[in-house]
Image (tube, rainbow, N blue to C red):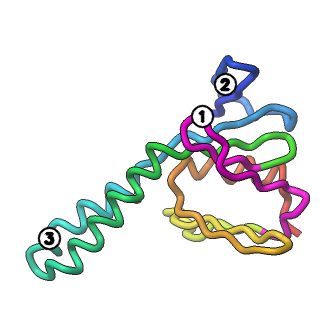
Amino acid sequence: MFTHKAGFETVTSPFAPNLASTVELKPSYNIPIVLVFAAIPLLIIQPWIGAAISLFGLFLLFQTVTLRLQFTATDLDIYRGEKLIRRFPYQEWQNWRIFGNRVPILFYFKEIKSIHFLPILFDPNTLKTCLEQRCPRI
C-alpha cells in the first residue's frame, strides 16, 4: 500500500505511484520490538548486555516513531515530524542494497561522497519498490 502526498492531503492507494508523486514509507516496528523483547531474558543472564540491547531497541523505537522517509520525484527526504532533516538527491546515488532476504534489517546506499546505512524502520516492500522505480541499480 502506498501513501501519496499531494499538497497537504494524503491519499492512500494500493496501486504503484507514478514517479512524480511523493511516497511516504509507513513505519515498521519489527526490529525495535524484537530487540526489546530479546533483551528481557538477557537482562537476567547478562545484565549489561541485556541493558545495552534494550536501550538500543528503545532508541530505534523512538526513531521509528519520529522519523519519516519520503521518496519524491528527485530525492529521498528524511523528516523528523514536519521538519526536513536530510535530503539525498538520486542523481548522487551510485548504488543501494537491502540486507536480509527474508527479514530485511539494513538498508545501504552509496552516494558520490558518502555511504549510508539505515536500519529498516519502515515498510521494506514499499522501500524496495520505490528504490527500483526511482534509483535502478547500476
Task: Tell me the number on the disc at residue 82.
Answer: 1
Q: Residue at x 53, y 63 (%)?
A: 119
Residue pointed to by mark 2: 13
Whether the magenta-drawn stretch holds residue 89 is answered as: yes
Q: Residue 112: image x %, image y %?
A: 86, 72
- Dot 3: few (<14), some (14–19), or many (≥20) neighbours within 10 Å? few
Between disc 2 and disc 3, the foreground one is 3
Tag 2–tag 3 contact (CB < 8 Å) = no
Q: Residue at x 65, y 33 (%)?
A: 2
In this rendering, the label closer to the viewer, 3 or 1: 1
Location of residue 132 (image quadrant): bottom right
Residue at 76% over, 34% down: 22
Asked whether, in this view, residue 6 is left or right of residue 49, the answer is right
Q: Earlier in the sequence, mark 1 or mark 2?
A: 2
Horizontal and vertical percent position of residue 31? 41, 59
Instruction: Report the quarter where the N terminus lies.
Output: top right
Residue at left 67%, top 17%? 9
The three-letter code of the residue at mark 3 reads: Pro
Q: Amino acid at mark 2?
A: Ser
SS type, badge 3: helix
| Image quarter of residue 110 | bottom right
**Observer-nearest residue: 106 or 6?**
6
Alpha carbon distance from label 2 to label 3: 41 Å
Q: Is residue 100 left or right of residue 113?
A: left
Q: Which residue extends farthest top?
A: 9
Q: Specify whether residue 111 is painted magenta.
A: no
As drawn, 72 above or below 92 = above
